[in-house]
């Protein structure tokens, strides 16, 4: 028996390859399916099933394309109603892969069709659970995402989740291994551990949700402090449930290299977004006017989903040379399929053609410390509330990047300000958005608060 966790840090997502003898199964595959197919071929195995723990909200799964290319049926838990052929398993139904068994445990709560897959080894012993978004390490799935589809409140869904955990998961042995669908950084939970594999016994001892004394306390604990889910989540659910464009077509369109003239014509004739995926330090010294910077070197896909939101938005790319295909794939992971191509030769081609370009006024933390006056200078901090509450520049105004579409209109365009995040990634995203909206009376601080904290600028907890 072989179990491989295929973890993608950008999405904090875990997919799984399972093989016994010459048969294999994939659980919660990412959109790029070739690695699964190639691994099975290398191992001399046939992919027998594609298992889905639920209709994912934070990424587009590769289940449909993988099924079409391999002939392996897609398996969902009870109550799922996909818009394509699939096996809708019954609670307790078992699927054989080689000498092992995958058993379906229906665990509604995160979503109504959510299920956990229990793997029984060659001897019939409970070996591991693939817990999807029902149980994370240190947390459980948020119960607010399926409210509209289920016509239930988040409290009612949390109550179902409690019953699922207590009746289906907690009775399992302590040595059962837990393989979750997500880890720290995912918006599908609120306090996940950075580790990606654990034992159920350890989770029973330390997971706050599993330690609640009763259902009422559980409901309160898991619904407290939930942030608003990213706007793209419902669109990804719809794609996972009803189908999507073939990934090969998306890839081929995105790989189209555009000359400066073609690039400019597309931007000028359509409602097209110019997405620049270069690192912040490179972007700030020169970029195409009105382009938005979300660097591939950070949490690229989640920020694209959160800030661009509409997965049908037409996009053209400016990337570092050789990063074009990576950008297309990472966009496709969260459902942004309308990619019209990329600028051939990248930004340097634009610059060398004599076209106008823009810059961001980025300064060092040392320069900021020299210029800063607590009572006279406005500082905008785009970190999250918990980061700000831990430590921040005196009198800094908290305006999280997540909500930039709400607070940009409140900025006094005549009053200069400083802009920072923790390390410079998020503040450069914010800077590019502000620039695109005609706001340019600011200085962005290189290295963010991490660099500011090393200076003598006053801070408060």
Image (cartoon, rainbow, N blue to C red):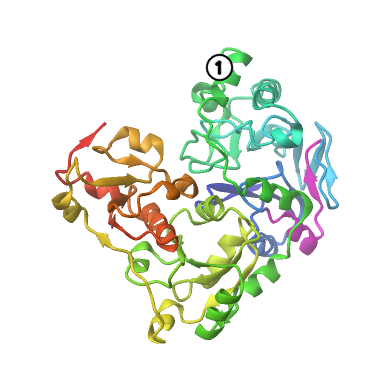
Give the x, y percent position of residue 75: 79, 46
Q: Quadrant of residue 113?
A: top right
Secondary structure beneath dot 1 equals: loop
Residue at 45% x, 67% y is: 290
Q: Classify 325 as above or below 392.
A: below
Q: In screen coordinates, is 299 left or right of 97?
A: left
- Residue 31 visible in the displayed image: yes
Direction front: furthest residue: 414
Observer able to see residue 114 = no
Q: Which residue is denoted by mark 1 in the rendering?
A: 212
Q: Is residue 285 left or right of residue 437?
A: left
- Image spot of residue 239 (x, y percent): 72, 53
Work out whether residue 96 or residue 268 is closer to the camera in this orientation and state it.
Answer: 268
177 drawn magenta = no
- Image point (78%, 58%), residue name: 67
Name above or below for residue 64 compared with residue 225.
Answer: below
285 is higher (above) or lower (below) than 257: above
Q: Which residue is drawn at 69% across and 23% down?
A: 156
Asked whether residue 69 is drawn in magenta, I would say yes
Q: Position of residue 365 (x, y in %)?
A: 21, 53
Q: How many labels does the image show?
A: 1
In the picture, the quarter occupied by the C terminus is top left
Residue 148 shown left or right of residue 323 in the figure: right
Span of residues in magenta: 61-78
Local crowd at mark 1 within 10 Å, few (<14), some, or many (≥20)?
some
Q: Nearer the viewer, residue 110 or 97?
A: 110
Q: Nearer the viewer, residue 241 or 391?
A: 391
């Amino acid at each position: 028996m072989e179990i491989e966790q295929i973890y993608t840090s950008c999405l904090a997502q875990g997919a799984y390859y399972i093989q016994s003898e010459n048969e294999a199964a994939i659980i919660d595959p990412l959109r790029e399916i070739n690695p699964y197919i190639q691994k099975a071929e290398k191992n001399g195995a046939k992919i027998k099933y594609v298992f889905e723990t639920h209709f994912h909200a934070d990424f587009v799964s590769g289940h449909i394309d993988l099924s079409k290319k391999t002939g392996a049926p897609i398996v969902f838990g009870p109550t799922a109603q996909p818009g394509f052929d699939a096996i809708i398993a019954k609670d307790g139904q078992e699927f054989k892969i080689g000498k092992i068994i995958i058993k379906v445990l229906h665990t509604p709560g995160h979503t109504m069709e959510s299920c956990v897959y229990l793997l029984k080894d060659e001897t019939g012993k409970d070996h591991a659970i693939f817990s999807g978004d029902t149980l994370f390490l240190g947390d459980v799935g948020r119960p607010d995402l399926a409210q509209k589809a289920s016509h239930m409140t988040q409290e009612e869904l949390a109550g179902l989740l409690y019953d699922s955990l207590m009746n289906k998961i907690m009775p399992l042995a302590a040595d059962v291994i837990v393989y979750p669908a997500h880890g720290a950084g995912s918006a599908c939970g609120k306090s996940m551990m950075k580790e990606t594999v654990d034992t159920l016994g350890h989770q029973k001892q330390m997971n706050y949700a599993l330690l609640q004394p009763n259902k009422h306390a559980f409901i309160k604990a898991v619904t407290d402090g939930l942030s608003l889910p990213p706007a793209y989540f419902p669109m990804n659910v719809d794609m996972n449930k009803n189908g999507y464009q073939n990934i090969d077509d998306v890839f081929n369109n995105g790989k189209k290299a555009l000359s400066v003239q073609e690039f400019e014509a597309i931007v000028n004739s359509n409602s097209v977004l110019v997405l620049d995926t270069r690192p912040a330090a490179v972007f700030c010294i020169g970029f195409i006017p009105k382009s938005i910077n979300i660097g591939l070197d950070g949490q690229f896909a989640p920020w694209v989903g959160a800030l661009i939101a509409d997965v049908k938005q037409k996009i053209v790319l400016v990337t570092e040379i050789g990063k074009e295909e990576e950008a297309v794939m990472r966009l496709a992971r969260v459902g942004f399929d309308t990619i019209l191509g990329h600028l051939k030769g990248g930004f340097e081609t634009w610059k060398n053609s004599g076209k106008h370009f823009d810059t961001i006024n980025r300064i060092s933390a040392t320069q900021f410390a020299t210029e800063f006056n607590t009572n006279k200078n406005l500082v905008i901090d785009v970190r999250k509330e918990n980061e700000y509450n831990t430590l921040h520049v005196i009198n800094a105004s908290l305006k999280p990047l997540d909500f930039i579409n709400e607070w940009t209109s409140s900025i006094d365009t005549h009053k200069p300000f400083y802009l920072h995040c923790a390390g410079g990634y998020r503040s450069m995203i914010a800077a590019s958005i502000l620039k695109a909206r005609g706001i340019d009376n600011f200085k962005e601080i290189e290295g963010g608060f991490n660099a500011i904290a090393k200076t003598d600028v006053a801070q408060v907890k």
